Amino acid sequence: MKTSKSFLFITVACIAVLMTAIQTPAAEVGQAAPGFSLTDINGRIHNLSDYRGKTVILEWVNPECPFVVKHYASGNLPATQKAATTDGVVWLAINSGRPGAQGDFDPAQVEKWAKATGAAFTAYIRDQGGQVGRLYGAKTTPHMYVITADGTLVYNGAIDSIRSANKADIAKAENYVNSALAAVKAGRPVKTPTSQPYGCSVKY
């Protein structure tokens, strides 16, 4: 009986360790950003490795999340996107929501939404299986990542410093993405490399 209990305990412990390993994101600030290959809504394949030599931003998005609505309807995220992409940054908006989840827009809906909000991302990608979202540990929408030209992840966290769905707070907040991009361009370390993301949970 004692042997059976010990075996059960060891088995449960091993499963717990295995599950932790499976769920632990591979993305770590200061380390190489995990590679991936995803197809956007226009059928174009995006391999992270193809963008070596360019700064890349990954934005986890859900068009129906109130926090995403805040940053798009106010013009904050579109302006941040436009400034970045004009400067040569690759901006990939990724929706890791499962099929049928809130904000799981089809390509026509995405096009309509992007036009209405003035979105200026490089590409919009549906990661419906959630593989890349889990690989990066994306928790919320929005959740932002900045990757340097040499493939190093240098920022992981919120779009800005005020955890709120109130548009009025945008002007008072520090835009962490803009700050990270400015530091990268100047060859300086990112002052705030990590922050707690806020928003709606990613609908895996």
Image (cartoon, helix red, strand yellow):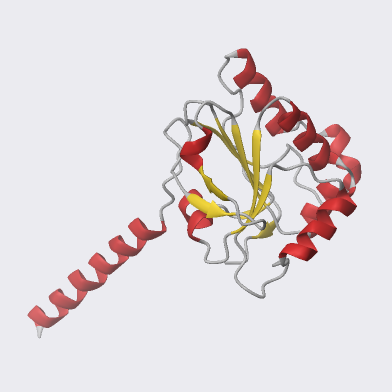
Circle count: 0
- Image quarter of the N terminus: bottom left
How far from the left and from the top, in percent, is residue 68?
77, 53
Closer to the camera in the image, 196 or 190: 190
Relative height, residue 79 to residue 3 (above, below)? above
Relative height, residue 150 to residue 135 (above, below)? above
- Res 157 quadrant in image: top right
Closer to the camera in the image, 135 or 87: 87
Whether residue 18 is visible, yes or no, is yes
Whether residue 64 is visible, yes or no, is no
How far from the left and from the top, in percent, is residue 62?
71, 59
- Res 99 quadrant in image: bottom right
How far from the left and from the top, in percent, is residue 161?
73, 37
Relative height, residue 16 to residue 21 (above, below)? below
How far from the left and from the top, in percent, is residue 171?
88, 34
Residue occupying the point 41% across, 47% down: 26
> Farthest residue in the front direction?
43
From the viewer's perspective, is 186 left or right of 165? left
Residue occupying the point 61% across, 23% down: 191
Residue occupying the point 46% across, 43% down: 27
From the viewer's perspective, is 5 left or right of 175? left
- Image quarter of the C terminus: bottom right
